[in-house]
Image: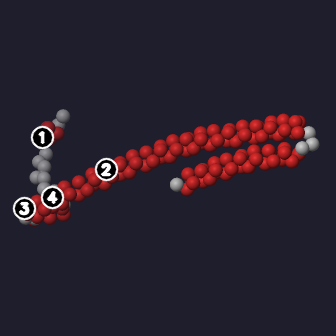
Amino acid sequence: MSPKARTKRATAPKRPKAASTVQRARAAMSREAKAAQAELQKGVSHLEKSIAEAQRGLRKAEKKIEADARARIRELRKDARAQLNDLKAKRREAGKTLKKLSAAAGESWREIKQSADSMLQDARATASSIAERFRSTLRG
């Protein structure tokens, strides 16, 4: 190694970095202004926390509403299946009764028609009440 490599080079003294605009403005502020700015900053941070909390609450409420709606839909579908099965049972019963009546009555079609009309009227009333219930439920 050469003797020159071992010697330290003299470096120029470091200059202080230029202060930013915010730092210069803060240095120029009075104590009261600095305190007011700090208080405002706290208020802003509290406001940000409140907004975040409100957003979390809204998401939670939305999830609950969606879960309740899904449960209500499942309940309505179950109820509709049960009522449709009842209607199908009434239809089968009406068919069986019609066969029995036609076999027993022979030529007395007037009695058969009255009996069938009565059963069909009952089934129609049941079906229309079911349909109206679902319409009113869907309307809210």
Q: Residue at x 15, y 58 (%)?
A: 39
**Residue 44 visible, this angle:** yes
Which of pointers 2 and 4 lies earlier in the amino acid sequence? Answer: 4
Depth order, front residue of 1/92: 92
Q: Which marked residue is nearer to the observer: mark 4 or mark 1?
A: 4
Depth order, front residue of 21/71: 71
Q: As shown in the figure, which amino acid type bears the numbered disc 3?
A: Arg
**Residue 24 visible, this angle:** no
Q: Residues within 10 Å of mark 1 (few under 14, many from 20)?
A: few
Q: Which marked residue is nearer to the observer: mark 2 or mark 4?
A: 2
Disc 1 on helix, strand or loop?
loop
Which of pointers 1 and 2 lies earlier in the amino acid sequence? Answer: 1
Which of pointers 2 and 3 lies earlier in the amino acid sequence? Answer: 3
Q: As shown in the figure, which amino acid type bears the numbered disc 1?
A: Thr
Residue 33 x %, y %: 11, 64
**Label of residue 7 in the image:** 1
Residue at the disc numbered 4: 39
Q: Residue at x 43, y 45 (%)?
A: 64
Residue at the disc numbered 2: 53
Depth order, front residue of 79/116: 116
Taking the image as shown, residue 113 lies to the left or right of residue 77, namely right
Which of pointers 4 and 1 lies earlier in the amino acid sequence? Answer: 1
Q: Residues within 10 Å of mark 4 (few under 14, many from 20)?
A: few
Residue 87 x %, y %: 70, 42
Residue 50 x %, y %: 28, 53
Q: As shown in the figure, which amino acid type bears the numbered disc 4?
A: Glu
Q: Is residue 23 placed above or below 53 in the rendered structure?
A: below
Q: Which marked residue is nearer to the observer: mark 3 or mark 1?
A: 3
Q: As shown in the figure, which amino acid type bears the numbered disc 2?
A: Glu
Real-space CA distance between mark 2 and mark 3, rounded to the nearest whole angstrom: 33 Å
